[in-house]
Image (cartoon, helix red, strand yellow):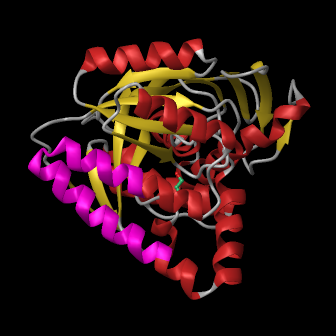
């Protein structure tokens, strides 16, 4: 038996990091995604094969036992990138008792790009293992399992990534609650990769330390991010892309204040603005990963993406996508 899962990647439009402290965030599934193909096999455990797109790596093969232990990693330097896969297999094996399988994972963005690759890979693996076991897996259960994997690997996680990659759409996520935003004018998004990985667990920990050191000031930055998010929700629901852009610029400044921007991310953000973005910011955990710029029209966005490519950054033009996890086979 063979099954396939397709899971969208996501951008956080506003509210990353503050979300970990209970403030709301607005996120969107995008046109890029992860594909997982699982084929029942005669062997033992799970054979993983993945194309780790990005500077260097390439194809990695590894074996994962039902309790999540990794062995025979073909490029030992990439063990760390496989932690979410191993944890998803451990959780999936416990929940659904799937048969041994070969699992092939393809991702349209580099690992640790800040686009929810970890949550999407986890969702894809879990959904595929459930389907191989003949288990009905509704979206709510899936997002809870994805969050369990995130907590297992990175210690702390909001519900933003697990919810967005599972359900799709433009979402306002507050704690475990979420609602879909109806946007009369969908923004065109340019997502540009800074060339360095973004490690969510490390960045969440770095922000936690900073907030501990600066006390009240850090808390107030989080509070203001929460207010920016409310403004972003209104701007999206009213189709006011200009105001949305201004608010994203403010949000970027606040993320820089939390120490999660980098020289490359600043360069990308400024290049996006210079190329006509209505606003631009770090998206995701930062410290590397991606920035996102909001544009009114696709041709300007294409020109901005070309400019970034000329500067040596990978860039994609995309839009919010209503689709969450899909299973076939
Ligand atoms: C990561 O995509 C977003 C963070 O806010 C962490 C989280 O929400 O779990 C940095």
Residue numbers of the magenta segment? 221-250
Question: Image quadrant of residue 201?
Answer: bottom right
Secondary structure mainly formed by the magenta segment: helix
Question: Image quadrant of residue 204?
Answer: bottom right
In the image, taking residue 221 as reference, residue 54 lies left or right, namely right
Q: Is residue 11 visible?
A: yes
Q: Residue furthest front?
A: 274
| Residue 240 counted in the magenta span | yes
Q: Could you tell me residue 267's position as x and y percent?
A: 59, 35
| Residue 325 counted in the magenta span | no
Q: Nearer the viewer, residue 117 or 317?
A: 317
In the rendered view, would you say 264 is above or below 13? above
Name the quadrant of the C terminus: top left
Q: Nearer the viewer, residue 87 or 245?
A: 245
Q: Residue at x 51, y 43 (%)?
A: 116
Q: Could you tell me residue 295's position as x and y percent?
A: 29, 31
In the rendered view, would you say 99 is above or below 145? above
């Amino acid at each position: 038996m063979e099954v396939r899962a397709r899971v969208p990647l996501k951008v956080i439009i506003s509210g990353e990091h503050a979300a970990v402290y209970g403030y709301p965030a607005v996120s969107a599934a995008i046109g890029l995604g992860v594909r997982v193909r699982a084929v029942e096999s005669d062997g033992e455990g799970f054979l993983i094969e993945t194309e780790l797109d990005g500077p260097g790596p390439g194809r990695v093969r590894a074996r994962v036992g039902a309790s999540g232990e990794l062995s025979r990693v073909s490029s030992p330097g990439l063990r760390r990138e496989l932690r979410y896969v191993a944890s998803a297999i451990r959780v999936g094996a416990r929940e659904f008792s799937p048969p041994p399988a070969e699992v092939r994972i393809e991702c349209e963005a580099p690992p640790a790009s800040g686009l929810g690759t970890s949550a999407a890979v986890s969702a894809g693996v879990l959904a595929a293992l459930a389907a191989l076991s003949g288990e009905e897996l509704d979206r709510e259960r899936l997002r809870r399992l994805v969050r369990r994997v995130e907590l297992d690997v990175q210690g702390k996680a909001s519900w933003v990534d697990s919810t967005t990659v599972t359900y799709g759409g433009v979402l306002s996520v507050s704690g475990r609650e979420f609602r879909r935003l109806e946007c009369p004018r969908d923004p065109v998004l340019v997502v540009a990769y800074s060339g360095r990985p973004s490690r969510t667990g490390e960045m969440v920990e770095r922000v936690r330390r900073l907030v501990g050191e600066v006390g009240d000031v850090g808390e107030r930055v989080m509070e203001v991010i929460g207010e920016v998010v409310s403004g972003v929700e209104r701007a999206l629901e009213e189709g006011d892309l200009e105001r949305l852009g201004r608010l994203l610029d403010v949000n970027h400044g606040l993320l820089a204040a939390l120490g999660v921007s980098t020289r490359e991310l600043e360069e990308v953000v400024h290049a996006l603005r210079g190329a006509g973005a209505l606003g631009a910011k770090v998206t995701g955990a930062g410290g590397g990963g991606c920035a996102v710029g909001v544009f009114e029209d696709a041709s300007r966005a294409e020109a901005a993406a070309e400019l970034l490519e000329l500067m040596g950054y990978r860039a994609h033009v995309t839009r919010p996508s209503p689709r969450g996890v899909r299973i076939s086979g």
